[in-house]
Image (tube, rainbow, N blue to C red):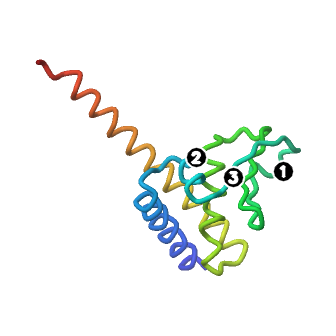
Amino acid sequence: MEDKNQKLEIEGQGFAEQIVENFGTNDVFVIAEKAGVKIIYESWFPVTIGEYNRKNKLICVNLNAEENREKIIAHELGHFFAQELSLDKAEEENFCHEFARSLSKMQLKISLKGAEDIKKNKNCKS
């Protein structure tokens, strides 16, 4: 089972990189819009923090969740993209977790790169 989980981690990471390349961004809101996935916000007892409705291509984010909303959306986008992978429920959750984690890491790297560029530009003298 560990080999399968490692494979899903690698697939989730690689898939996140591919999505960023294909969509030209790592912004979950832009990715969802370009993929035709609608995002809505509702409140319910926090058993879950987000849900993906395959039939309606809809991500529902729980307003009662303490988790970062972008992270929730990234995870639920993982479910959207995982539809083609023929995974069982546990495998799909592992894939989505890794997809969201990888997408989040890429956001951090891009943010840090942007901060470095700004810092470099601030130090330039004309």
Q: Position of residue 16 (x, y in %)?
A: 48, 61
Depth check: give the residue in front, 7 or 34: 34
Would you place residue 110 above or below residue 19 in this image? above
* Residue appearing at x 77%, y 38% in the figure: 63
Horizontal side of residue 25 vs 100, given as left or right = left
Q: Position of residue 39 (x, y in %)?
A: 70, 49
Q: Residue furthest right?
A: 45
Label whose residue precedes the other's in the sequence (1 or 3): 3
Cα separation, mark 2 vs mark 3, equals 9 Å
Label whose residue precedes the other's in the sequence (2 or 3): 2
Would you place residue 82 above or below residue 114 in this image? below
For the residue marked with disc 2, what is the amino acid? Phe
* Residue appearing at x 63%, y 58% in the figure: 36
Cα separation, mark 2 vs mark 1, equals 24 Å
On residue 6, the disc is: none
The residue at which mark 1 appears reads as 47
Of badges 2 and 1, nearer the viewer stands: 2
Q: Position of residue 72 (x, y in %)?
A: 66, 49
The residue at which mark 3 appears reads as 38
Label whose residue precedes the other's in the sequence (2 or 1): 2
For the residue marked with disc 1, what is the amino acid? Val
Q: Position of residue 32 (x, y in %)?
A: 60, 53
**Quarter holding the C terminus?**
top left
Would you place residue 39 above or below residue 8 in this image? above
Q: How many numbered callouts?
A: 3
**Quarter holding the N terminus?**
bottom right
Label 1: state its secondary structure: loop
The residue at which mark 2 appears reads as 29
Horizontal side of residue 122 vs 104, given as left or right = left
For the residue marked with disc 3, what is the amino acid? Lys
Q: Residues within 10 Å of mark 1 (few under 14, many from 20)?
A: few
* Residue 8 location, quadrant: bottom right
